[in-house]
Image (cartoon, rainbow, N blue to C red):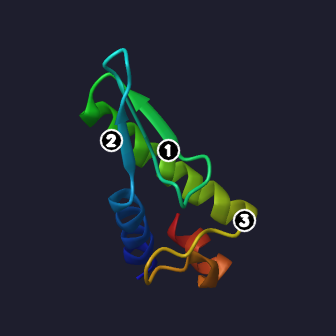
Amino acid sequence: MLKFIITGYIENALSQAEYDKLDDGTFSDRIPQCKGVVAFGKTLRECEEELRSTLEDWVFVGLKLGHELPVLGEYDLNKVPRDEWMAAV
């Protein structure tokens, strides 16, 4: 069950990503609701993959350190019991 909650959270966050094409032709993207989640890439696809990886790390580190994570849609990871998500990792 927890796997589906985290997957839903990540998919919801990625759907809110904002992409920019930079002057040098590369790309940057970020998720405004998730402070510090930013990625860069030579192609849009590379940038999207990097953003997903960065977001996943950001979520797991935030959970491990007990940070308050933003509620995204119906997904509130702050309500997930610590022991439950640690066992899933």
Residue type of the residue flagged with mark 2: Glu
Residue at image mark 1:
54
| Residue depicted at x 42% and y 77% | 5
Q: Nearer the viewer, residue 26 or 46?
A: 26
For the point 27% across and 33% down, the residue is: 44
Answer whether labels 1 and 3 touch (C-beta < 8 Å). Answer: no
Q: CA distance from mark 1 to mark 3?
A: 16 Å
Residue type pointed to by label 3: His
Measured from the top left, where is residue 26 in percent x and y? 34, 22
Q: Quadrant of residue 34?
A: bottom right
Q: Is residue 62 above or below residue 84?
A: above
Q: Which mark is residue 67?
A: 3
Residue neighbourhood size for the residue with mark 2, other residues' Cα within 10 Å, grouped as few (<14), some (14–19), many (≥20): many
Q: Earlier in the sequence, mark 2 or mark 3?
A: 2
Q: Secondary structure at mark 1?
A: helix
Q: Nearer the viewer, residue 79 or 86?
A: 79
58 or 1: nearer the viewer: 58
Q: How many marks?
A: 3
Instruction: Please tell me which of labels 1 and 2 falls first in the chain.
Output: 2
Q: Which residue is mark 2?
A: 48
- Report x, y in % for residue 46: 30, 32
**Marks 3 and 2: in contact by CB < 8 Å?**
no
Label 3 Cα neighbours within 10 Å, binned few <14 / some 14-19 / many ≥20? few
Q: Quadrant of residue 21?
A: top left
> What whole-number distance in Å separates the C-alpha atoms at marks 1 and 2?
10 Å
- Compare residues 79 and 36 and report the one nearer the observer: 36
Query: Is residue 49 visible to us here?
Result: no
Q: Is residue 67 above or below residue 42?
A: below
